[in-house]
Image (spheres, rainbow, N blue to C red):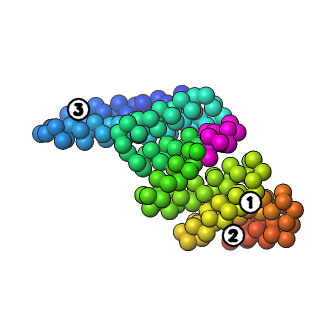
Amino acid sequence: MKHILLVVCCLLFSFLRGQNHQKVDSSEQIVQLATANETIIIKAYYAIGTTLLKNKELENAYENLNSGLQKAIEINNEPLTALGAYHVGDYFLQTKDITQALTFFNTALVSFQNLDKKADVAKCYYKIGKSYNRISDFEKGLFYSFESLRLNETLKKEKEIIRVSTQIGAIYLVTGDYKNAELNFKNALQLQES
C-alpha cells in the first residue's frame, strides 16, 4: 500500500513541478492549469480509495473517495463527480448501507446518462441491481440487472455480460425459479468458455 501511495505522490509531484516551468500568458491559462492539477489530484484520490476498498481498508477508502468526490463537485467536473459518486456508492455497498449505496449509484447513473457514457450506465445498473438484491428486493434487482445486461449486449462487453448473467442466475436461484437460474448460468458459462 505504501508503494502505491509513494508512486502516486511522485507522479503528482513530477507533474506539478513540470507545470511550474510552462509559460503562462493569461489568467485563463492559469485556471486551466489549476483545473488540470485538481483533476489529477481527484484521480489520485480515486485510485488510492479504490485500492483501499479492494483491500478492505474501509475507513481510509471512504476518506479518499469522499475527498475526491468533494473536489470534483468543487470544480464542477461532471464526469469525475459521477465517477466519485459511483465509487462512494461502492463503499456503501461494501459496508452494507444499502440506502446510501442506492443514493450514490442513482446519482452516478443520472450523470452518466447525461454524459452518454453507456458502459458506465451499465455498471451503475449492475450495482443498483446488486444493491436491491442485498435487501431482498429481487424484483427491482432483476429489473436493473436486465437493464445492465441489455446495455452490455449492445456494447458487446462479454466480461460484463458474464458477470450480469451470473447475477441474474443467482437471483432466480434464490427466488426458486430454477429454470431461469439454469438458463442464465449456462449462458454465462458458454460465454466464458468461448
Compared with residue 150, is residue 112 higher up or lower down, i.e. above or below?
above
Q: Local crowd at mark 3 within 10 Å, few (<14), some, or many (≥20)?
A: few
State the residue in front, 174 or 185: 174
| Residue 36 lies within the magenta run | no
State the residue in front, 1 or 28: 28
On the picture, is 88 further left or further right than 81? right
Q: Does dot 3 land on a helix, a strand or a loop?
A: loop
Residue 158 location (% of width, % of height): 61, 66
Q: Does dot 2 land on a helix, a strand or a loop?
A: helix
Instruction: Considering the whole magenta stretch, tell me its main secondary structure.
Output: helix
Residue 193 location (% of width, % of height): 72, 68
Residue where numbered disc 3 is placed: 20
Residue numbers of the magenta segment = 91-102
- Please give the name of the residue rendered at 21% of the width and 37% of the height, measured from the top-left corner: 30
Q: Residue furthest left?
A: 25
State yes or no: discs 3 and 2 in contact (Cβ < 8 Å). no
- Please give the name of the residue rendered at 20% of the width and 34% of the height, measured from the top-left corner: 21
Q: Inspect this view and state whether residue 121 appears.
A: yes
Q: Depth-wise, is mark 1 or mark 2 nearer the camera?
A: 1
Q: Local crowd at mark 2 within 10 Å, few (<14), some, or many (≥20)?
A: few
Q: CA distance from mark 1 to mark 2?
A: 25 Å
- Of the 4 image quadrants, the one containing the C terminus is bottom right
Residue 169 location (% of width, % of height): 77, 63
Q: CA distance from mark 1 to mark 3?
A: 55 Å
- Please give the name of the residue rendered at 73% of the width and 70% of the height, measured from the top-left corner: 187
Residue where numbered disc 2 is placed: 191
The three-letter amino acid code for the residue at tag 1 is: Glu
Q: Inspect this view and state whether residue 11 appears.
A: no
| Nearest to N terminus: mark 3 or mark 2 | 3
Q: Quadrant of residue 103?
A: top right
Q: Quadrant of residue 123?
A: bottom right
Residue 82 location (% of width, % of height): 47, 48
